[in-house]
Image (cartoon, rainbow, N blue to C red):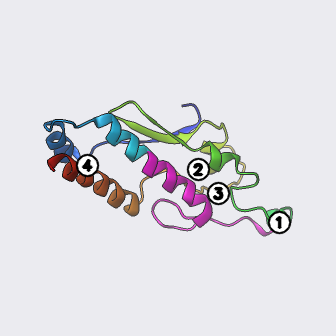
Amino acid sequence: MAGLTTSLTTLGLDEAIRRLSRLEGFAMAELADGAGAILESSTRDRFDTKLAPDGTPWEPWSEAYDETREDWHSLLVEEGGLRDSIASYSSGTEVEVGSNLIYAAHQHFGGDETGSGIPARPFLGISDQDESDLRELVTGRLEDLLQ
């Protein structure tokens, strides 16, 4: 995916994945797809909450820029192109979540390197809630297989 992505590795879940893989009926691809769905959804939700994955609020527009916006405009959401471009891709053992839009990285990391003055507004990454949801996904799948 061109643009910007974050990848989910099994760091911290390695033991659970190893145990799951010994069970008949375990499909890593299904687990990866489920993880991708969780992360894609939480990433899109950040465009509503205006919070980075670590819970810090996004920096608001400058006062001058705010005056150029319509009342219905929202930070990083004018018509929804960036939010709607968020997608997850799974190879069966790895999950990537990101956007294929060229300006995604500029919005995520900010424009210090290009001199644009746009502050970083991180939308990709794994929050504490994401980690909890991913653990629940893995343990739920394990419980299903053990029944």
Percent position of residue 113, x then y: 63, 44
CB atoms of marks 4 and 3 within 8 Å: no
**To which residue does mark 1 refer?**
64
- The image quarter in which residue 66 lies: bottom right
What residue lies at 54% left-to-right and 31% top-to-bottom?
1
What residue lies at 31% left-to-right and 53% top-to-bottom?
137
Q: Is residue 99 left or right of residue 78?
A: left
Name the amino acid, label 3.
Answer: Pro
Which numbered disc flags the more N-terminal residue, 4 or 3? 3
**To which residue does mark 4 refer?**
141
Name the amino acid, label 1.
Answer: Ala
Which numbered disc flags the more N-terminal residue, 2 or 4? 2
Residue 7 visible, this angle? yes
Could you say which disc has been placed on residue 119 in the image?
3
What residue lies at 55% left-to-right and 64% top-to-bottom?
51
Q: CA distance from mark 2 to mark 4?
A: 33 Å
Q: Secondary structure at mark 3?
A: loop
Start-end of magenta stretch = 37-64
Which numbered disc flags the more N-terminal residue, 3 or 2? 2
Front: mark 1 or 2: 2
Percent position of residue 57, x then y: 56, 68
**To which residue does mark 2 refer?**
108
Percent position of residue 69, x then y: 83, 62
Q: Is residue 43 highlighted in magenta? A: yes
Between residue 1 and residue 21, name the one nearer to us. 21
What residue lies at 22% left-to-right and 50% top-to-bottom?
144
Between residue 147 and residue 40, name the one nearer to us. 147
Front: mark 2 or 4: 4
